[in-house]
Image (cartoon, coloured by chain):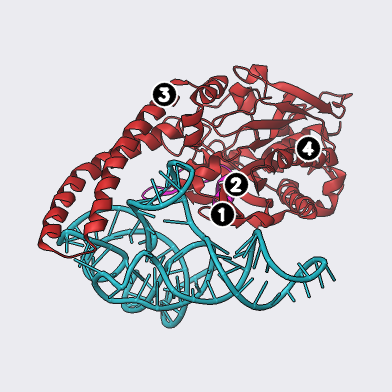
Chain colours: A red, B cyan
Amino acid sequence: MIDINLIRENPEKVKEGVRRKQYDPSVVDCVLELDKRRLGLLQQTEELRRERNEISKEKSEENIARGKEIKAKLQELEPQLKVLEGEYVEALAEVPNLPFEDVRVGKGEEENVEIRKWGEVPQFSFSPKDHVDLGRQLDIIDFEAGAKVAGSGFYYLKNEGALLEVALVQYGFQFLVKKGFTPIVTPDLAKERFYLGTGYQPHGEEAQTFTVIDSDLGLIATAEITLAGYHADEVLNKKDLPRKYAGYSHCFRQEAGAYGKYSKGLYRVHQFTKVEMFAFTTLYGSQKVHEEFLALEEEFWKSLEIPYRVIEMCTGDLGAQAARKYDLEAWMPGRKDYGEVTSTSNTTDYQARNLGVRYRDGDETEYVHTLNGTLVATSRAIIAILENYQQEDGSVVVPEALRQYIGKDKIILPSA
RNA sequence: GGAGGGUUGGCCGAGAGGUUCAUGGCGCAAGUUUUGAAAACUUGUGGGCGCAAGCCCUCACAGGUUCGAAUCCUGUACCCUCCGCCA
């Protein structure tokens, strides 16, 4: 959530930011109104509590009688305050994080900015296949078995497909450990508080997550949820910041209603594996770490020699959490287009305030800034690798960086 | 699954209805001293509002009892130990 003081002191500025994000700025007035009513009632109850504390210091007939009056009055006011408190928090949660000033203002996806392109889009002397055909012919991806056992949107990786997944994780971990990240394997499920706190809606129309019946648990959509939660309710030391984690987890998404050629095969699936970067920084350190995350994503994808482009989201495509966000889109010959493979966001103190992650700076405690970024999501990486590295005979060359983890240079047809 | 024991500030740990304003220690921060550091000493160190004085909240969470609850009662979560089962 956003800082209430920012709204109180500068409502017009907040409204402008909310408007840029294409959210309805009237939530800001709603918050202010509820805040005012809440404070009025809070003042009343606090005054009664003060008196109660005062008279409980000395036992007398008179004080006991007055104490009974106060008790009755508080029993009336406190439930009202609680209701108002609830409405206020709910309204406040609807105010999105403000975009940074220099983020391009735009309505949505169409107005995102391409920052740069890297690599040569491969020119094939034959007609290239998509990863679904390649995967089937090489006997490394089995969508039919996935559908039979778990339903549409699930898949089996086998043979070099399975090795490729593990290799990407192994290489990704090694890569980030060398850059000073702490490798960490997180739970694949989390309590509601943590996905709400990171901005994932567990229930209702927009729900993209799977939840566990009769429990408070949901399958995580990204390790961002469990990594952000790792330090929930803690006060970190300033000198320990930034803390950078390389998280490994499975990710589960319902992807309801997402069909069509752009969600073919591995592109939009219910389960995939991801190595995620996550950082806790000071108030002042987040922009630098965000640029670092983007640079690491680029270095990683360059090392796989996959052509990509970098997109900076315009204000309308940032979502509620982010103040700035970049995506990497890898070239996918099967789509004859770029497809999103990574996303890195600076969520400033927005998630930290929800989850109570602070740091101590001398006498002060401040909310940390949190950042997340994909290093590699195995499913989409496999698409990019198979499709870009395919050969005329249907085989696929293994990117050099992965060869030591797979133990071979080339994936060949089973019959060959 | 069964039986016990626990949860107090950044950490450790006292506290068992009103002399508590949550002792004390460690750590951390600032200051004094020092050429510099260490040590020592002093001060500060849960959250909110406030220029301040001060006020409210806070002892896992949620209810309850009471004029008054960290303390008593109920429920929930989590942790630990032992037994059983198990990859």
Disc 1 and disc 2 in contact, CB within 8 angstroms: yes
Judged from the image, the secondary structure of the residue bearing numbered disc 4 is helix
Q: Magenta span covers which residues?
A: A211-230
Name the residue that disc number 2 marks.
Answer: A368
Q: In which quarter of the image is residue A182?
A: bottom right
Question: Do the dots labelled 1 and 4 sit on one chain?
Answer: yes
Residue at position x 28%, y 52% from top?
A50
Earlier in the chain: of badge 3 and badge 2, it is 3
Q: Nearer the viewer, residue A7 or A60?
A: A60
Magenta residue check for A217: yes
Query: What's the chain of the residue with tag 3?
Result: A
Q: Where is residue B74 in the image (x, y as percent from the top left)?
A: 23, 64
Judged from the image, the secondary structure of the residue bearing numbered disc 3 is helix
Question: Do the dots labelled 4 and 2 sit on one chain?
Answer: yes
Q: In the rendering, which numbered label is found on residue A231?
A: 1
Name the residue that disc number 3 marks.
Answer: A29
Q: Distance between the residues labelled 1 and 4?
A: 35 Å
